[in-house]
Image: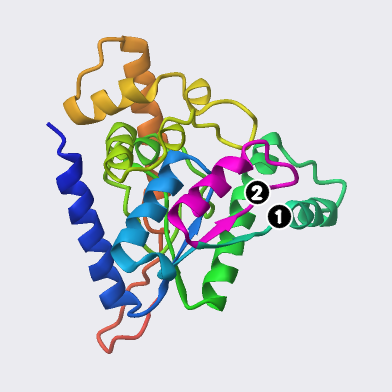
Amino acid sequence: MFDAAKVKCECVEWIREFFEKNGKGCNAVVGISGGKDSSVVAALCAEALGKDRVVGVLMPCGVQHDIDCAYKLVNFLGIKHYEVNIKAAVDGVVGAIPSELKLTEQTRNNLPPRIRMATLYAVSQSCNGRVANTCNLSEDYVGYSTRYGDSVGDFSPLSKLTVTEVKQIGYTLGLPKELVDKTPIDGLCGKTDEENLGFTYAELDAYIRTGVMNDADKKALIDRKHEQNKFKLELMPMFEPELLSDGTAGI
């Protein structure tokens, strides 16, 4: 019963309202991977603000085999864009870490997304921008993002929409079908999202929206990931000292 056209219009209006309150006249800065999420976010921002107020940032790490998809998107929308290759930055950090500290595979996989976010904010601060988060509800539900990498931003149009719903909005926006239907690959270890997760987005989306999952093993896996990764969506825990009657901190 998802009304993609209605939700698209509501999201466009929400983006306009965000910029009225949090950056009147500012630009939307979007990291462009060439996948459905960044494509839909960029298209929504272009409709909400006009293409002249959307800046796409392409951030390959060395050679990106599908960067043509990213260029197809920015050219289709007609938005200003920059390519910033982050390989030298990634190699610089890795090379600067003392050799006795052996970096884990997860560390190496998560470093590029964090450098990409630093790059997005560097571009944003230099062009009067606000950084768009491109995560969706399906990814957020099971923590499929890098903390302080692709999990952050200044505003998030898709965080309450599943992958299935995002794709429907992409069709409604008239985006090239090959971008909307592009098999999502994490860009870190070369596997598809679904290979990494252990279940399909269709299964996950149905479970999120209906609570029904007939495969007991997959249900347990989704529930476990959801619980383990809730911290990514929460504010950083803060120590709160007991206050004295005069309002100062006491021990």
Q: Give the residue type at disc 1.
A: Ile
List the single residue furthest toward the left: 1
Give left or right: position of 14 versus 101.
Answer: left
- Quadrant containing the N terminus is top left
Q: What residue appears at the point 36 percent right and 68 percent down from the top-left corner?
A: 240
Dots 2 and 1: beta carbons under 8 Å?
Answer: yes
Residue holding disc 2 = 112
Q: What residue appears at the point 33 percent right and 41 percent down from the top-left corner?
A: 170
Task: Give the number of the disc on residue 180.
Answer: none
- The relative height of residue 183 versus residue 11 in the rendered view (above or below) is above
Give left or right: position of 209 versus 195.
Answer: left
Q: What residue appears at the point 75 percent right and 51 percent down from the top-left corner?
A: 87
Residue 113 locus on image (x, y percent) = 59, 49
**Mark 1 closeness class: few <14, some 14–19, many ≥20 residues within 10 Å:** some
Question: Is residue 66 on the magenta stretch?
Answer: yes
Q: What residue appears at the point 52 percent right and 71 percent down from the top-left corner?
A: 124
Determine whether the residue tagged by mark 2 lies in a helix, strand or loop. Answer: helix
Choose top left, top right, bottom left or bottom right for residue 25: bottom left
List the single residue furthest toward the right: 99
The residues bearing labels 2 and 1 have C-alpha atoms spaced at a distance of: 7 Å
**Mark 2 closeness class: few <14, some 14–19, many ≥20 residues within 10 Å:** many
- The relative height of residue 157 versus residue 178 in the rendered view (above or below) is below
Q: Give the residue type at disc 2.
A: Pro
- The relative height of residue 216 versus residue 60 in the rendered view (above or below) is above
- Quadrant containing the C terminus is bottom left
Residue 7 locus on image (x, y percent) = 18, 47
Residue 114 locus on image (x, y percent) = 60, 54
Residue holding disc 1 = 86
Tell me where the magenta segment starts and ends, as one range: 56-79
Give left or right: position of 244 versus 66.
Answer: left
